[in-house]
Image (spheres, rainbow, N blue to C red):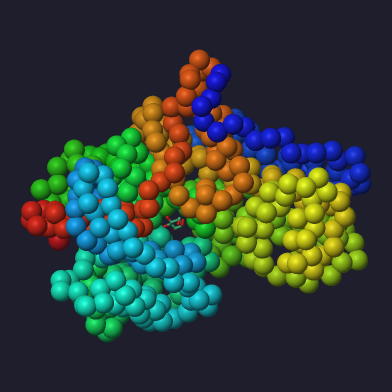
């Protein structure tokens, strides 16, 4: 079969002849535990479809399947000036988007680093910080002041229930956030209030999940875009369903929303299999979950998203060093014992080391952890990083396969964004290979029918397009949420 998609990864295992028998034995165990074969992937996908359906049912399930109230496909002809903000895992991004029509746009943006303590700060502090950043940005891009109220699309990448488009009741924080006083509340009025205090003419018209933004932005430029995906600090996906296929909306919609209307769904599938029916968890995954601020939640995300990959590596290495005593003999392990000291760039850089003696890895361990490594240790470390990276990619695509199967998509562009997709070595190649393992496409196909493609900027352009579609609906007197 000739694949035009990304090629399979190079075999990088190298020789392990200088590795001690006890370490080799342990590596074989890890290989087994972290490898997810094609049959297991297909089993996971089957269960995933059941869980997607459950999430849309009246009784609900693990996966929230939140209607996003975007009820049109963008045409690419939307126009106007819109503000967009994106409260992501590490940055606050503020964007001015000029939609030009003809599938074109212009953007001007600023990024503000979120201070580390913000993840655990007080609610007012967070909203005040965002409002101040907005004020700075607006003063910069409109030095003469702005005459009209600027409509703002707010990308909020956490599970938020929405009874209408300009609302988002935070169900629970994910990705290590735990700001008090926000869970269970609508974040839109909190932000709007803080904006009022700094006195800038901005109205929050839409609250958007990053996956929904990615979907709509990509659809603005590519009519084949059927899924919006994030493989980053968290993992999640969005797609267009049809109102009549969403049982939990039955009887709750205004008459002007026809049952044939499309409706974006923010799956929030990081919560897939919280009941632990099919996920092949290792003892390390169990430890990550137990030591997280929210045990029992986001079980799928904890095995494959960027927030956790470095941490998984850390606890595997600590296990080998401290419990098994087969690596890092006589080394100071104090830094390695610090939770979350290794972010995702750490395993990524290990995998990227181009040198035969893995000298980049040696430097990395010395600099970040104060640990001196031997060559055999580095070979084993590299292999473990590969196992974690490979498992992440293989699990990540199960959500794609499940949505495509559920909606009956035989072909699709799955628009993806996020740090893991963008930067983690071989992620794209491994993900494409995993889709082939799941779908078992016939050998005579020239191209993979379902492909992951780079997304357009969801939290900028996507948020703007959604704000534009919402304004249009409101002008036409159409509803943008549940029956009052
Ligand atoms: C987490 C969030 C979700 C977001 C994803 C990617 O899973 O709960 O809302 O889409 O991360 O950022």
Q: Which one is nearer the viewer's eye here, 73 or 241? A: 73
Residue 373: x percent and y percent? 85, 58
State the residue in front, 107 or 263.
Answer: 107
Is 144 positioned to the left or the right of 122 in the image? left
Where is residue 117? Give x, y as percent: 52, 78
Ligand 1: quadrant of the figure: bottom left
User: How many badges with numbers are in the image?
Assistant: 0
Residue drawn at the location 52% of the way across and 49% of the way down: 422
Residue at the image point whose x is 32% and y is 59% from the top: 107
Residue 20 shown left or right of residue 339 in the figure: right
Residue at the far bottom in the pictured view? 197
Camera-side residue of 422 and 33: 422
**Residue 347's x, y, as percent?**
67, 54
Left or right relative to 136: residue 75:
left
Q: Is residue 413 visible?
A: yes
Seen from the viewer's position, the closer of residues 311 and 354 is: 354
When asked about the image quadrant of residue 179, the answer is bottom left
Name the quadrant of the C terminus: bottom left
Q: Quadrant of the N terminus?
A: top right
Question: Could you say which quadrant of the image residue 224 lies in?
Answer: top left
What x and y, as percent, mark residue 301?
Answer: 53, 53
């Amino acid at each position: 079969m000739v694949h035009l998609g990304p090629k399979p990864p190079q075999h990088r295992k190298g020789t392990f002849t200088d590795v001690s028998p006890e370490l080799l034995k342990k590596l074989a165990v890890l290989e087994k535990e972290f490898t997810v074969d094609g049959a297991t992937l297909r089993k996971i996908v089957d269960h995933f479809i059941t869980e997607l359906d459950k999430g849309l049912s009246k009784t609900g399930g693990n996966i929230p399947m939140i209607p996003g109230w975007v009820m049109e496909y963008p045409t690419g002809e939307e126009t106007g000036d819109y503000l967009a903000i994106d409260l992501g895992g590490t940055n606050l991004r503020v964007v001015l988007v000029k939609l030009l029509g003809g599938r074109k746009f212009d953007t001007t943006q600023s990024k503000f680093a979120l201070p580390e303590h913000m993840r655990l700060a007080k609610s007012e502090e967070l909203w005040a910080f965002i409002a101040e950043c907005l004020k700075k940005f607006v003063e910069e891009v409109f030095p003469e002041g702005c005459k009209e109220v600027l409509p703002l699309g707010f990308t909020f990448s956490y599970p938020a229930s929405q009874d209408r488009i300009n609302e988002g009741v935070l169900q629970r924080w994910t990705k290590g956030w735990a700001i008090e006083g926000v869970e269970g509340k609508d974040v839109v009025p909190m932000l709007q209030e803080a904006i009022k205090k700094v006195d800038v003419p901005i109205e929050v018209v839409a609250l958007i999940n990053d996956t929904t933004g990615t979907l709509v932005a990509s659809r603005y430029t590519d009519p084949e875009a059927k899924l919006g995906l994030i493989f980053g600090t968290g993992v999640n996906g969005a797609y267009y369903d049809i109102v009549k296929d969403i049982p939990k909306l039955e009887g709750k919609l205004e008459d002007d929303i026809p049952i044939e209307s499309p409706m974006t769904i923010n799956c929030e599938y990081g919560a897939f299999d919280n009941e632990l029916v099919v996920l092949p968890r290792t003892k390390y995954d169990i430890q990550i979950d137990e030591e997280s601020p929210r045990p029992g939640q986001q079980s799928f995300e904890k095995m494959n998203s960027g927030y956790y990959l470095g941490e998984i590596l850390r606890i595997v290495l600590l296990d080998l060093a401290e419990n098994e005593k087969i690596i890092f003999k006589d080394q100071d392990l104090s830094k390695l014992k610090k939770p979350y000291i290794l972010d995702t760039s750490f395993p990524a850089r290990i995998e990227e080391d181009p040198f035969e003696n893995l000298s980049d890895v040696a430097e990395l361990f010395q600099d970040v952890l104060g640990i001196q490594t031997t060559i055999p240790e580095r070979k084993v470390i590299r292999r473990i990083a590969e196992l974690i990276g490979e498992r992440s990619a293989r699990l990540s695509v199960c959500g794609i396969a499940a949505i495509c199967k559920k909606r009956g998509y035989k072909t699709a562009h799955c628009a993806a964004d996020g740090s893991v997709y963008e930067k983690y070595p071989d992620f794209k190649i491994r993900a494409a290979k995993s889709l082939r393992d799941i779908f078992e496409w016939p050998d005579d196909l020239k191209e993979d029918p379902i492909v992951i493609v780079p997304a357009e900027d969801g939290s900028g352009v996507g948020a703007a397009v959604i704000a534009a579609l919402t304004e249009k609906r409101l002008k036409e007197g159409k509803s943008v949420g549940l029956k009052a």
